[in-house]
Amino acid sequence: MIGVKKKLIGQVLVEKGLISHEILNTALDYQKKNAPNKRIGEVLIELGYITEEELSQALAESLNIPYINLLETNIEENLINQIPINIIKNYKIIPIKKDEYGIVLLGMVDPLDTEAINVAREYLNTINVDIAVISKTAFEKVIQDIENKIIVDQALRDIKTEITEEAEDLVRSINLDESESQPGIIRLVEAIFKQSITYRATDIHIEPTNKNVKVRYRIDGVLYKGLEFPLEKLPEVVSRIKIMAQLDITEHRLPQDGHLTVKTRNSEYDLRISTLPSRYGEKVVVRILDKKQTIIDISKLGFGEDNIVKIKTMISEPYGFIVVSGPTGGGKTTTLFSMLKEIDLESKNIVTIEDPIEYDLENITQVQVNEKVGLTFDNALKYILRQDPDVILVGEIRDEETLRISVQASLTGHLVLSTIHANDAISTIIRMKEMNVNQEYLFSSLIGVINQRLVRVLCNNCKKKTKANFNDLIKAITRDNKDEQELVKDNPIEYVYEPQGCPLCNWTGFLGRTAIAEIVIFDSFVKDLIIQNVPHYKIKKILSQEKNQKFLINDAIEKLSKGVTSIEEITRVI
């Protein structure tokens, strides 16, 4: 039980060195004037002086009871089942374990809530309850996992041993809002799809292991754990997905690709299905494309004002070659289509070659690559040139032939936009130079190169400000590369922000993504450096000193200083 209250919470926080007396007095004044119904701990969190975790630990100390990190604690499932999930969520309580004497350890976000204690005693059918403090963040994360398990368990209880004939007759377009009354396997698959859409995921990974099947969701470029279900149910889940995507359910030895459409109340999604035989069964990866997604304005992608000016200058050229480079999943396609948005679609004939088509666009002719019938990027490009295009978007430069035709097209009065994989803008130019194309033609057509990455944006609701050691920060971001450090030595920053996690960001600490980028206009100055085979790092140094050129590292430091993203996120993508 709760011991004798020894100290006030503010006193504990001061003694632990988490706040000063001045900060405590400031918070007390704020509480009195602006938040009389809130406790001082809540006010201190709201004002950004302490974290929720720090408050929970201090609260436990002030009440002389234990603090428990719920995310690192084994919770006895039979105790959880004794209290309805809505009661657990309402009172923010969770029974953790029962000892040999029958005493239940009850985790509470608010250990002073006597009503919650009495409710727990009633459902647990015991008065022998000890209290421990848990953080609200950890509680809500654990509850989310419990609810996920409830979904899976309910679906598994309804699963039949074979796919029903009714399931085999289902059409490719399904409605996720009508799945509640469906058989177990169907509801399990649709629960996976629903959860991915709720989480804003771009991909679903259904991965068999030696113990079970794990479902993971890619959210803002990072994979997060989702549902789990028994390995013996994998064949039925895979068969269900194959039926929906009109794939061969009898073929388990070869990879297969397909797609299907799912609907919710507010949107419609195209799901691209890929199956792959693996050691423990077929792995399924699903790419999620929102059919109603619109092209984002170039000003909202995260480019700085100087870079936006460069992009609009490049796109205003009547002909030439513009290249966007970066890693897979770096936002290259989004940038390309945002550039198209800057063009007058009514007066121009615009044709795209894509694999896959990600946006459904009006006033633009979109061509889907189909390598099975020979419609590759280079072949499609040859025929598009007979269609009187003004602007051509080539989804990706995958080979020398596609690059050669793209360059030729840009020299004959067409504006050509495309993407290529490269680490930065200068290496993009060098890579294209080293491909088997006419260098004179390439250099004559090239307008400029955009190189970019996507970093996750810190959640404004929970991010935490912290003092920065600039030298250590730069060493970490540049991986102690002295040449890169030279580019940012004159831009020191004192503070950065760190992710925390809250319900708004689904406990990730991040909400959405933004671009960090560098844009190099291919003028005569850059051309001469490339032709002279000046080393890569020297080109960057010369451009920085003589042209005030900004590179990825500069944009990264600026976004760190503004609290847009974190150090760990920058080091992840650069």
Image: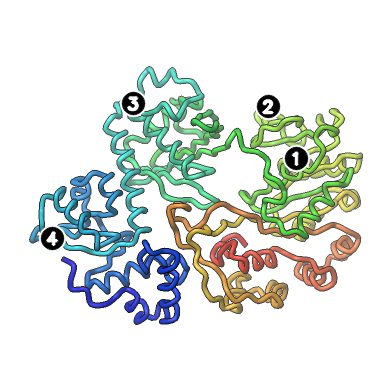
Q: Which residue extends farthest left?
A: 101
| Tag in front: 1 or 3 | 3
Which residue is pictured at 37% across the width and 70% down the height?
Answer: 54
Res 550 quadrant in image: bottom right
Q: Is residue 287 left or right of residue 94?
A: right
Which residue is pictured at 15% across the width and 53% down the height?
Answer: 121
| Tag in front: 2 or 1 | 1
Q: Secondary structure at mark 4?
A: loop
Mark 2 or mark 4: which comes first in sequence? 4
Label 2 sits on residue: 373
At label 3, the amino acid type is: Pro
Mark 2 or mark 1: which comes first in sequence? 2
Do we see residue 471 in this rendering?
Answer: yes
Above or below for 55 versus 384: below
Crowd class of label 3 (few under 14; some 14 to 19; many from 20; radius 10 Å): some
At label 1, the amino acid type is: Val
Q: Are marks 2 and 1 in contact (CB under 8 Å)?
A: no
Between the C-alphas of marks 4 and 3, the distance is 40 Å
Res 519 quadrant in image: bottom right
Crowd class of label 2 (few under 14; some 14 to 19; many from 20; radius 10 Å): few
Q: Nearer the viewer, residue 245 or 343?
A: 343
